[in-house]
Amino acid sequence: MTTTSETRAVVLGGGGVAGIAWQIGVLATLLEHGIELNDADLVVGTSAGSVVGASLRFGVLREALVAQLQQNEPEENAAGQGELPHFSVEEFMNMMGTAARGSGGEQEARARIGRAALAAGEGLSETRWVDTIRSLLPAPSWPSGLLQVTAVNADDGAFRVFDASSGAELAQAIAASCSVPGAWPPVRIGGVPYMDGGMRSASNADLAAGYDKVLVLSCAPEAPDSPFGPTLPQALKRLSGSADTFLLEADAVSLSAFGTNLLLSSTRRPSALAGQEQGAGVVDAVKVFWGV
């Protein structure tokens, strides 16, 4: 069993609409088997993971799973903006490639993404985007358990972590963390525009440094290195020196459910079902890891 002095963290990575559904499927299944991951001392949420992290902290995973399994009408999605006809996966990947090839360090590379995000966000409604995220949350204020939500300053590429002490509204912080460049507009908090926290790292698992046990949900394999920030393999290598880590990465069945565009609402139900199946397959291992 877990000792009272042992600290634990849950890290939830990015993965779009499909990633939200998959992670909710996994976590709800673990919860059904008595694994109370909300007992964690820290929950880190990046992009999709910020939405899921809020559901975990507010104790509404079961309800969230029911919502993911419902079949939406084709014109609806989690952002309330249809199937994002203005967003192109190919253009997004080209933008990331261009930003990666510039000079300077990680922050400057992220700043190049930020400039593209600000340009692409023109004409998109920031107010509507934040209001949509607000409507998905079970409460307007931050949860009592420590939840850290990641974002990147679109002006200068600086990394920012929001929590209950940051002064940011929860809906604004999560909307910022989920603001994929070209899909949704950067969100201004304190006058500063912020974009998707995944523009630094898909997981930002390095924030869990100092915790004894770290459980990570990753929606896709990550490259060994990146020009934008620490990748999951790098973070896990550093964490392994002082922490016991458990990585749950989307398997082949789950990746197939995601398809080629993770932002489509049509991915929700198949991704949630895949998450349930994958979660059921690791129950025993996670019980041992979490100390149930």
Image (cartoon, rainbow, N blue to C red):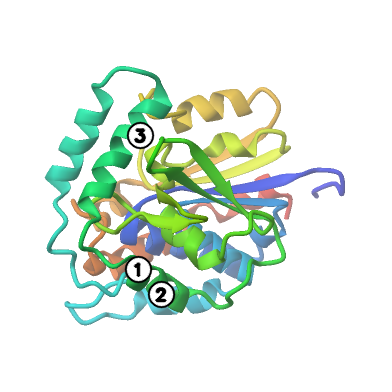
Mark 1: secondary structure: helix
Label 3 is placed on what type of residue?
Ala
Distance, label 3 to label 1, CA atoms, is 22 Å
Distance, label 2 to label 3, CA atoms, is 26 Å
Residue that sits furthest to the right in the current view: 4
Residue 254 at x, y = what percent?
A: 32, 53
Mark 2 and mark 3 lie on one chain; the one further toward the N terminus is 3
- Residue underneath mark 3: 111
Distance, label 2 to label 1, CA atoms, is 5 Å
Label 1 is placed on what type of residue?
Trp
Mark 3 and mark 1 lie on one chain; the one further toward the N terminus is 3
Residue neighbourhood size for the residue with mark 3, other residues' Cα within 10 Å, grouped as few (<14), some (14–19), many (≥20) = many
Residue closer to the observer: 26 or 114: 114
In this image, 249 relative to 3: left or right?
left
**Residue at left 44%, top 45%?**
197
**Residue at left 43%, top 57%?**
188
Asked where in the image residue 130 lies, by quadrant, the reply is: bottom left
Residue closer to the observer: 16 or 279: 16
Residue 126 at x, y = what percent?
A: 34, 65
Residue 192 at x, y = what percent?
A: 45, 50
In this image, 266 relative to 180: left or right?
left
Residue neighbourhood size for the residue with mark 1, other residues' Cα within 10 Å, grouped as few (<14), some (14–19), many (≥20) = many
Residue neighbourhood size for the residue with mark 2, other residues' Cα within 10 Å, grouped as few (<14), some (14–19), many (≥20) = some
Mark 2: secondary structure: helix
Residue that sits furthest to the front in the current view: 191
**Residue at left 69%, top 32%?**
243
Residue closer to the observer: 90 or 126: 126
Label 2 is placed on what type of residue?
Asp
Q: Is residue 130 above or below residue 75?
A: above
- Residue underneath mark 2: 131
Kindly indicate whether the residue at mark 1 contacts the one at mark 2 (C-beta within 8 angstroms).
yes
- Residue underneath mark 1: 129
